[in-house]
């Protein structure tokens, strides 16, 4: 934990639970956000800092024509082969950590009191759990997760379930939570009220 008064609130939840949606509602209310998912995508965009290592480790078949990560192919690989998933994570994780630290330093230098960190796999990672002061979990049923991700990306239910199988269970996530935001109903107004309440309490 930090020696300054700066506080880190980890925002997490399973795939499709509504992390990014809630994060944007918090940003709209003046909260500073660090998006670990977006940082990960930047690392694997065209000319992203992780791309040379990805090509070395997985081969040119995983590099798209524009030099970015061939996401569909990589997704198929890592969600069928745990060993490949671990290699990818080992490659990305240290870079995500240092990018997060950099953004935190900027906020601290600006005198900001707190940050919300959108970290999809927070509960799964001992490292992240010790880096954040509080854990805010966005919670919904597995059926809702599957429906939302299918709608959002056109993925098959089985593909969503394969991803969910690599993530912590709903129970484990709830057990790690300091706060829980229920987000089972597709109702932005309700999530906005939750965001308002969070801003008043953090
Ligand atoms: N309260 C809500 N009302 C309406 N739509 C919602 C609500 N919450 C989430 N959604 C929709 O569900 C989908 C998934 O939400 P979102 O992208 O925020 O989830 P996420 O937890 O960030 O997912 P990922 O783990 O993939 O990053 C999005 O299309 C979003 O618009
Ligand atoms: Mg998201």
Image (cartoon, helix red, strand yellow):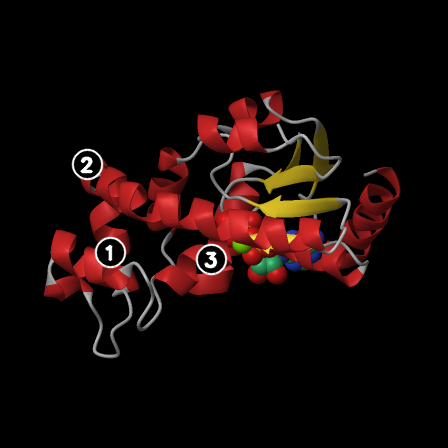
Pick the front one: 5 or 82: 5
- With respect to residue 76, does 9 lie above or below? above
User: Where residue 124 appears, x then y in whole percent?
Assistant: 44, 30
Judge depth for marks 1 and 3 and give the one in front. Answer: 3
Q: x%, y% of residue 96?
A: 43, 49
Mark 1 vs mark 2: which is more N-terminal?
1
Closer to the N terminus: mark 3 or mark 2? 3
Would residue 16 be visible to someone looking at this image?
Answer: no
The residue labelled by disc 1 is 74
Label 3 lies in ligand 2 vicinity (Cβ under 8 Å): no
Q: CA distance from mark 3 to mark 2?
A: 23 Å
* 55 shown above or below 116: below
Q: Which x, y percent locates residue 2?
A: 64, 31
* Residue 34 horizontal side relative to residue 121, left or right: right
10 Å crowding of disc 3: few (<14), some (14-19), many (20+):
some
Image height check: is 170 above or below 38? above
Q: Nearer the viewer, residue 26 or 54?
A: 54
Residue for badge 3: 39
């Amino acid at each position: 934990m930090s020696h300054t008064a700066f506080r880190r609130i980890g925002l997490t939840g399973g795939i499709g639970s509504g992390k990014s949606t809630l994060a944007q509602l918090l940003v709209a209310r003046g909260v500073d956000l660090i998006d670990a998912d977006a940082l990960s995508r930047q690392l694997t965009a065209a000319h992203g800092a992780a791309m040379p290592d990805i090509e070395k480790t997985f081969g040119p078949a995983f590099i798209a024509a524009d030099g970015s990560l061939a996401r569909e192919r990589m997704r198929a690989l890592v969600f069928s082969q745990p060993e490949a998933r671990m290699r990818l994570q080992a490659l990305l994780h240290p870079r995500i950590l240092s990018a997060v630290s950099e953004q935190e330093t900027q906020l601290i230098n600006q005198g900001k009191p707190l940050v919300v960190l959108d970290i999809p796999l927070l509960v799964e990672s001992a490292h992240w759990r010790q880096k954040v002061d509080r854990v805010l979990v966005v919670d919904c049923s597995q059926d809702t997760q599957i429906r939302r991700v299918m709608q959002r990306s056109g993925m098959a239910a089985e593909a969503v379930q394969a991803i969910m199988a690599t993530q912590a269970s709903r129970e484990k996530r709830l057990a790690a939570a300091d706060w829980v935001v229920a987000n089972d109903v597709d109702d932005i107004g309700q999530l906005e009220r939750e965001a308002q309440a969070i801003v008043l309490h953090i």
